[in-house]
Image (cartoon, rainbow, N blue to C red):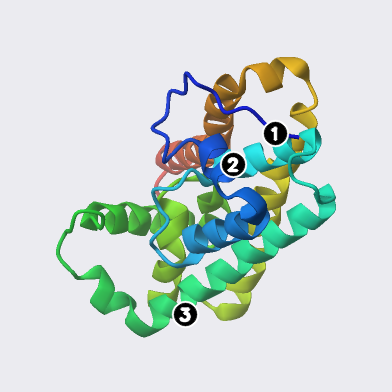
Amino acid sequence: MRVPVNAMSILPSWLDPEVILTSLGPYLLPGLCLIIFAECGLMIGFFLPGDSLLFTAGLFVAQGFIDYPLWVVCALLTVCAFVGNMCGYWIGTKVGPALFSRPDSRLFKQEYVDKTHEFFDKYGPRAIVLARFVPIVRTFITAIAGVGRMDPRKYFVYSAIGGVLWATGVTVLGYFLGQIPFVHENIELMLIVIVLISVIPIAIEFLRARKERKAEVSEPAN
């Protein structure tokens, strides 16, 4: 079954998840796995719409365009996300400092690294899970964890949790919502909703941190 690509896409074609996936043809699933791996570990896929690609992949499974069981697709994508994080951590331990000190280029911006550093410092180990839902940050935080020599065992655990919540969670969401006619007919709107949903964990952490700061300020001095 061929899934029609929206003619009135609000995204440029090279960022439209439907265009990206359909252009992969018979190599759709291997290509998607490679994209997820690159975005999570190679620091070259930070501009790719990972959340939207996962959601659209789930929708494609529901429509029969991806001819594999949902559990197979979720398992492969989750493994690729996890292995990508391992690769990013290794890059951080080996060449991170030299890489992050390079001047700005057309694609690489120091502000990306600074933003990710602040995110990691603010949320600690939880940042590995939360960063999965934050574009750009999820790409660079793996290497920054390696640069900071985060405890490997703790890093692996948080990476696994984040990989399941992100790769499996978003794909499953796309699968079940993709069976609803309204969703299928309004994919652009659904992709915007996915972006909004992806910032919910960050909003929760922000409110929690704000509440903790207020509690500290209100405590009487000893």
**Badge 3 density bin: few <14, some 14–19, many ≥20, Cα 10 Å:** some
Which label belongs to residue 2?
Answer: 1
Classify 47 as above or below 89. Answer: above
Rendering coords of residue 84 (x, y %): 55, 68
**Badge 1 density bin: few <14, some 14–19, many ≥20, Cα 10 Å:** few
Which label belongs to residue 22?
Answer: 2
| Cα–Cα span, label 2 and label 1 | 9 Å
Amino acid residing under circle 2: Thr
Q: Is residue 101 left or right of residue 127?
A: left
Q: Nearer the viewer, residue 56 or 22?
A: 22
Q: Is residue 31 left or right of residue 222?
A: right
Classify 136 as above or below 52. Answer: below
| Cα–Cα span, label 1 and label 3 | 40 Å
| Cα–Cα span, label 2 and label 3 | 32 Å
Could you say whether the residue bearing mark 2 is in a helix, strand or loop?
A: helix
Amino acid residing under circle 1: Arg
Q: Is residue 193 left or right of residue 220?
A: right
Which residue appears at 18% of the width and 58% of the height? 105
Could you say whether the residue bearing mark 3 is in a helix, strand or loop?
A: helix
Q: Quadrant of residue 193?
A: top right
Classify 156 as above or below 218. Answer: below
Mark 2 and mark 1 in contact? Answer it, CB < 8 Å. Answer: yes
Q: Nearer the viewer, residue 69 or 165?
A: 69
Rendering coords of residue 44 (x, y %): 38, 61
Q: Name the residue beneath numbered marker 3.
A: 90
Q: Closer to the N terminus: mark 1 or mark 3?
A: 1
Rendering coords of residue 50 (x, y %): 53, 47
Which residue appears at 58% of the width and 57% of the height? 31
